[in-house]
């Protein structure tokens, strides 16, 4: 099968791309009309995919649409060690059962972006788990200790007196070996993965294999507009969020990242995004752009109809200072409970740390009154309205 690449199409190597290594070689490969083997490696360390995870997946989808062979590689072996990238402490290893469960969840969610039936799914445990000690030593010989210690995260740990596990030195080596059995031409990854990605080129050369090309994609900021989108920070939009939740979260992003979200999280043509940029510069209300953004994102993962419905409810709640219709109800386990127990039973917040963050920020209310402490107890003498953040409502009764 030949690959048809339109010369005028600039989005493949431009939109949502931070760096191309090596660009000149990559462009020659594309013009050759060769069907490329392009992959993304994912360590299945959690169950939810966010719009941040979707950025490299969406880049894969572009290559898939051009007819290239897309591979989704699950780090079933590397997940047991944990990627040290950006971490200041050793990550707790996962079990095979946890990894398998997370992988199934990732695949189910990735179907919202990729045509799963037309991609190759691989697991690096299939080759890394079979290496002999001699194989491991050969792989380790491709790097020096000084090259590893050059990484900023390790320097930070040394300065802080924190430990560096020797197995963490093996992580970029293992990830760097992956493209060899995959026979990969191209690897996609976040900018935070650059060391690991370039390690792959170095290792391929050491093994006498033509080095893969690399595309890095930007890291999408979370709802705070500062930190990387992360479930642990509670600043994320999950691709499995409901239409209403997705719309509301999008409307909460700060103005300065509106255009970035348009580029990285929607299919809106760049020409249309330029028009929105121009309108904002000329004084258009950022809320109008955010409403367009929210509709585009919701329609992408749900439907146009659900996007319009979510917008209508958002307007009802916030423009008219109302509460949504059809608020779900929950019967709690006791007539008097600490607020933290009520929220846990509601299942509206995924973790205790996020509950604490919301309460400290004044984001939890009972009948319109802010909760000031996680220890605060609520007594049910009738139905009460629980509000978490700006978008989550629940009627509570005993």
Image (cartoon, helix red, strand yellow):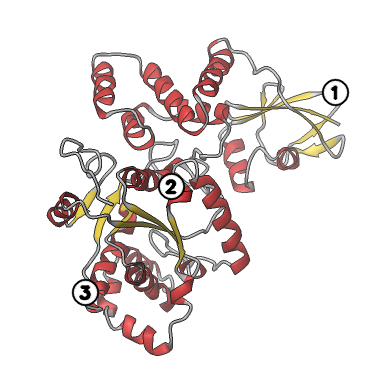
Query: Which residue was labeled with disc 3?
Result: 205
Alpha carbon distance from label 1 to label 3? 71 Å
Q: Which mark is residue 327?
A: none
Other residues around mark 2 within 10 Å, as few (<14) / some (14–19) / many (≥20): many
The image shows residue 303 at horizontal and vertical percentages of 51, 26
Q: Is residue 129 left or right of residue 270?
A: right
Numbered disc in front, either 1 or 3: 3
Using the rendered view, name the quadrant where residue 144 is placed: bottom left
Which residue reaches farthest top? 320
Question: Does residue 373 lie above or below 155 as drawn?
Answer: above
Q: Which image quarter is the C terminus in?
A: top right
Query: Which residue was labeled with disc 1?
Result: 382
The image shows residue 63 at horizontal and vertical percentages of 31, 47
Query: Is mark 1 in CB contact (under 8 Å) with mark 3?
Result: no
The image shows residue 20 at horizontal and vertical percentages of 21, 52
Q: Nearer the viewer, residue 46 or 386?
A: 46
Q: Which mark is residue 53?
A: 2
Other residues around mark 1 within 10 Å, as few (<14) / some (14–19) / many (≥20): few
Which residue reaches farthest bottom? 134
Query: Which SS class for mark 1?
Result: loop
The image shows residue 256 at horizontal and vertical percentages of 33, 29
Q: Is residue 323 left or right of residue 205?
A: right
At horizontal 57% and vertical 63% (from top left) the residue drawn is 99
Using the rendered view, name the quadrant where residue 396 is placed: top right
Other residues around mark 3 within 10 Å, as few (<14) / some (14–19) / many (≥20): some
Query: Which SS class for mark 3?
Result: helix
Numbered disc in front, either 2 or 1: 2
Going from the N terminus, do you reach mark 2 or mark 1 first?
A: 2
Q: How many marks?
A: 3
At horizontal 72% and vertical 22% (from top left) the residue drawn is 367
Q: Is residue 395 left or right of residue 360?
A: right
């Amino acid at each position: 099968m030949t690959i048809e690449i339109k010369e005028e199409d600039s989005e493949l190597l431009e939109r949502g791309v931070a760096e191309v290594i090596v660009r000149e070689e990559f462009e020659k490969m594309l013009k050759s009309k060769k069907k490329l083997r392009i992959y993304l490696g994912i360590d299945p360390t959690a169950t939810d995919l966010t719009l941040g995870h979707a950025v490299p997946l969406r880049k894969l989808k572009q290559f898939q649409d051009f007819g290239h062979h897309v591979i989704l590689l699950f780090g079933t072996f590397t997940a047991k060690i944990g990627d040290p990238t950006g971490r200041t402490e050793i990550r707790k290893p996962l079990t095979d059962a946890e990894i398998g469960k997370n992988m199934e969840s990732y695949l189910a969610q990735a179907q919202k972006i990729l045509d799963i039936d037309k991609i190759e799914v691989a697991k690096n445990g299939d080759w890394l788990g079979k290496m002999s000690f001699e194989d491991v030593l050969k792989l380790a010989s491709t790097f020096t200790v000084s090259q590893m210690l050059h990484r900023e995260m390790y320097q930070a740990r040394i300065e802080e007196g924190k430990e560096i596990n020797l197995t963490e030195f093996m992580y970029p080596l293992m990830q760097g070996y992956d493209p060899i059995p995959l026979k990969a031409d191209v690897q996609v990854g976040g900018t935070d993965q650059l060391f690991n990605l370039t390690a792959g080129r170095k290792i391929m050369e050491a093994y006498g294999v033509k080095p893969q090309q690399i595309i890095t994609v930007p890291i999408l900021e979370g709802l705070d507009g500062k930190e990387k989108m992360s479930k642990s920070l509670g600043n994320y939009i999950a691709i499995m969020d409901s239409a209403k939740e997705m719309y509301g979260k999008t409307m909460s992003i700060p103005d300065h990242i509106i255009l970035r979200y348009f580029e990285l999280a929607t299919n809106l043509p760049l020409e249309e995004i330029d028009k929105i940029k121009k309108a904002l510069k000329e004084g258009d209300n950022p809320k109008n752009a955010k409403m367009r953004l929210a509709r585009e994102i919701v329609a992408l993962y749900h439907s146009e109809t659900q996007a319009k419905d979510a917008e209508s409810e958002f307007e009802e709640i916030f423009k008219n200072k109302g509460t949504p219709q059809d608020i779900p109800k929950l019967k709690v386990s006791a007539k008097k409970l600490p607020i933290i127990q009520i929220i846990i039973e509601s299942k509206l917040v995924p973790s205790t740390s996020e509950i604490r963050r919301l309460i400290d920020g004044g984001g939890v209310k009972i009948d319109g009154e802010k909760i000031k402490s996680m220890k605060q107890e609520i007594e049910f003498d009738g139905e009460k309205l629980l509000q978490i953040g700006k978008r989550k409502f629940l009627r509570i009764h005993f």
